[in-house]
Amino acid sequence: MRNPRSPWPFTARAEELDLVRRNLSAGRRGIVVTGAAGSGRSRLTAEAVPEAMRDSVLVVDDAHLLDDASAALVHELALGGRTRLLVTVREGEPAPEGVSRLWTENLLPRLTLAPLTERACAELLARAVDGYVDALTVRRLYRASHGDLRLLRELVVAVHAGGDLSHVSGTWTWRGTPPITARVRELVEETIRDLDTEERDALELIAAGEPSGAGAPSAGADVPGALVAPAVLERLRARGLVTVDDRLVHPLHGPVLRAAAAEPSHSGGPSGGRRAPRASALAAECEELAARAYAGRLAEIPRGIGERMAEDDTGWDEPAMPEFCARRARVARLRGETREAMAWSREGLRRSPHHHACLAELAHAAAYVGDLTTAWQALSRGPAPAGEARTRPWPVTGARPPAPAENTRSPAPGTDTRRRAPAGGTRSQAPAQDRRPWASAAVPARTWALAAEGDLDGALRSALGLAGDGLFGDDLFALHDVVRLGSPELVADRLGELADRAEGDLAPLLARHARALARRDGDALDKVARGLADLGLMLHAAEASAHAALVHPDRRASQASRDRASALAGACQGARSSALVNLALPRLTARQRQIVSLAAAGLTNRQIAEQLTVSIRTVANHLCDAYARLGSSDRAGLEGLFTVGRRGDRAGGHR
């Protein structure tokens, strides 16, 4: 790992840097750069004007601190037009008239630096620590820094110094309470330094009563804001410091204010003793997550739900915590947040290394992003598939996974396979780990691992095996996997029957997806994609748009669906399902796509030949033809071809 105290790489400001340099070129007067504290104004200045250029450009950093005489001089230089100026000003701070007139009189253009996005923050952190940072850690640091890159850096330095930044399986992870070092406290206090005494006291009262553990206040509990004068609360809300339900906006205001008041615990605060018991809260959350996931109401689930429990490293004495992590991973995966799903799965496995649902969710999400080593290794840690010795591990990438044990999963003669498990929205209780067999979670993961390796026939056999199972045959997502793999006619009737008796919008929508794809109805598929996106199933929506793009007879309609699929896939954190692969590699035959997928997954020509029962020469010929069609010279260039949302349609030129 790079030393986090060393200079961080300049990241995610390429467009701003280009704009500043253009305005500092010969014949230009310069530019004013504004931004909030910690937005990177000074770093942008250093990149735009290296030491070699300082003789030809006058840099005025933090011009809002100038006295009136100095500000007037800067204004005169701008009027004269002979001196190129780079002036930086902190937003929210009053600037002298001579400085503000630089842009109000249009003497210099003004560039306002927006806060980095979470994706840009992830890229910056990865380069700063020289490795992949898990999704929960990225979001936590992003929220805690509140757009201040100085605070982001100090948090990483403090976490690393405290030994809380761990490196497991190639991923950097932070769990535990936020480190409140002197520098972190100084930067956080800077955001509230202009509060009056009344406002500061109110903020400290809210901080003292803020929940600091995994539990949440019970429905009837008083919140600390109830003890604050309404007029003061309104002022704090107007400043963006307190939410409408009287909670602190900045994640570090509570810890900093409690530390300053020497109150590390809120046990004596206004809400002490009124939190719901953690165990019952976790059980309730598991129930709610499962119910909403089965009903497809994913858009209703707050994005950060449960993160504080994982972040603060609490709940180790709660047996329900790994199951909660598994449910949270399932929600993230269904929403297309694949990297986040992997992070939640790993969090559950950190607490319970052999938790079946967490292993299955990790394998499922890893298969979506093409990380087949992780997928097969996770599956190998669970129980062996039915009909095989329990001691036999499932193989990692490069070896053919075992074929589905269809004879052991088939229902007994006379069994009604259509009424054992209720459809979406009708399950009233989330199944616990010991009540949900490993196969119900592991087989879908195995299905998509096979698909990621290009073995679409094996993936379809796996999906059909689960869809026909007597215990889980009515699971909507198991049936819909068959549709996603391109064989809607096999399950369209079953999905239609389920849609007739299921509650909610999910079942009818999945049934319409099957019917529309079977009929090759592009317009209907576009409507399905919009409906799935509204429910929060972004990857499923991207696939429906990809299906529409491939069946639309009209070229314009096809391109519109392709663009929609690309945009939706871009929100899915690198997921690449078979439908998206088909869209990304439209010039290849089905066999070529299969071989290219296996090659991109790391298999050699010999391994591909053995898996597909063809000759090595046949594999080599297909790859050579594919390279020519894709404009790639060898295996090294294959990986970037698969993610529609990130790299566009390389074969067709679409971006």
Image (cartoon, grey):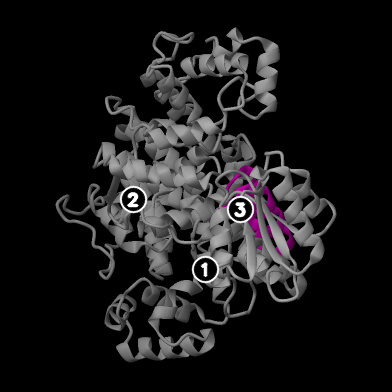
Q: Is residue 184 above or below residue 26?
A: above
- Mark 3 or mark 2: which comes first in sequence? 3
Give the residue at x 39% y 41%: 471
Give the residue at x 62% y 43%: 535
Instruction: Indicate yes or no whether the magenta region holds residue 515.
Output: yes
Q: In this rendering, would 395 be left or right of 482?
A: left
Give the residue at x 50% y 90%: 628
Percent position of residue 34, x then y: 67, 51
Circle 3 or circle 2, nearest the eye: 3
- Mark 2 or mark 1: which comes first in sequence? 1
- Mark 3 or mark 1: which comes first in sequence? 1
Q: Is residue 353 above or below residue 45?
A: above
- In the drawing, what numbered circle is on residue 51? 1
Inspect the image, locate mark 3, and give the three-letter code of the amino acid beneath it: Asp
Residue marked by disc 3 = 61
Outermost residue to the left: 391
Instruction: Decide whether the magenta segment is chiefly helix, strand or loop.
Output: helix
Name which quarter of the figure residue 26 lies in.
bottom right
Residue marked by disc 2 = 172
Whole-number angstrom distance, CA of label 3 to CA of label 1 = 15 Å
